[in-house]
Amino acid sequence: MAVSVPSVRSGIATRLDTITGLKVYTQPPDSINELPCAFVVPGKLDYKTTMGDVGFMGPFEITVLHAMASDIDDAQSALDPYMSPVGTYSVKAAINADNTLGGKADCSWLDMCEEYGILMYAEHPYLGCKFTLHVVAISA
């Protein structure tokens, strides 16, 4: 397995693509044309803790954005299923279905969901949340 940040991002995107109706980007888009959407960015990656320094471990942040509705309750009802631990729209369930991210990582686990609320992106407000996905990827 060749280890790279782009391949791990691609593996995460592949898992998120299993969520019906979610537009998935492997990196932050310049603009958002479809909602709901998700995009992936690497966090603070640790290279020194892996065997032989041939891989990395660390967090990747998954941001999920949904359109603001005229009624905040409607917007929350639309976003909440992504945060559920189970179900068709669950980010956690999508990752858990293959925590190797299609063979792009040795393992991964969703740690937390935070920053639920109004998120600004490209100068536009969205209702959204951010997930922290920890990934261990070591070259064979």
Image (tube, rainbow, N blue to C red):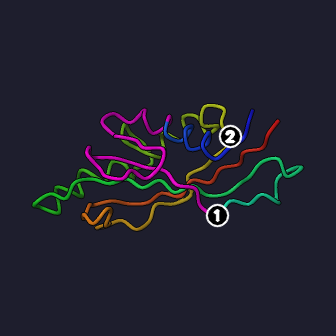
- Residue 1: x and y in percent read 75, 32
Q: Is residue 2 magenta?
A: no
Residue labelled with disc 2: 105
Report the residue at 59% width, 61% height from top: 43
Sequence-wise, which precedes: disc 2 or disc 1? 1
Residue nearest the observer in this picture, 42 or 81:
42
State the residue lying farthest toward the left: 70
Answer whether labels 2 and 1 touch (C-beta < 8 Å): no
Give the quarter of the image for residue 57.
Answer: bottom right
Report the residue at 77% width, 48% height from top: 55
How many numbered marks does the figure carry?
A: 2
The boundaries of the magenta stretch are 14-43
Q: Nearer the viewer, mark 2 or mark 1?
A: 1
Question: In the image, is 98 to the left or to the right of 25?
Answer: right
Q: Which SS does the magenta portion mostly show? A: loop
Give the quarter of the image for residue 124.
Answer: bottom left
Residue labelled with disc 1: 44
Report the residue at 11% width, 61% height from top: 71
Q: Residues within 10 Å of mark 2 (few under 14, many from 20)?
A: many
Give SS at disc 2: loop
Q: Residues within 10 Å of mark 1 (few under 14, many from 20)?
A: few
Give SS at disc 1: loop
- Residue 81: x and y in percent read 33, 48
Question: In the image, is 3 to the left or to the right of 7?
Answer: right
State the residue lying farthest toward the front: 30
Q: Is residue 71 above or below residue 83?
A: below
Question: In the image, is 59 to the left or to the right of 35?
Answer: right
Q: Is residue 63 above or below residue 9?
A: below
Q: How far is the residue under mark 2 from the one under mark 1? A: 16 Å
Q: Which amino acid is tagged 2?
A: Ala
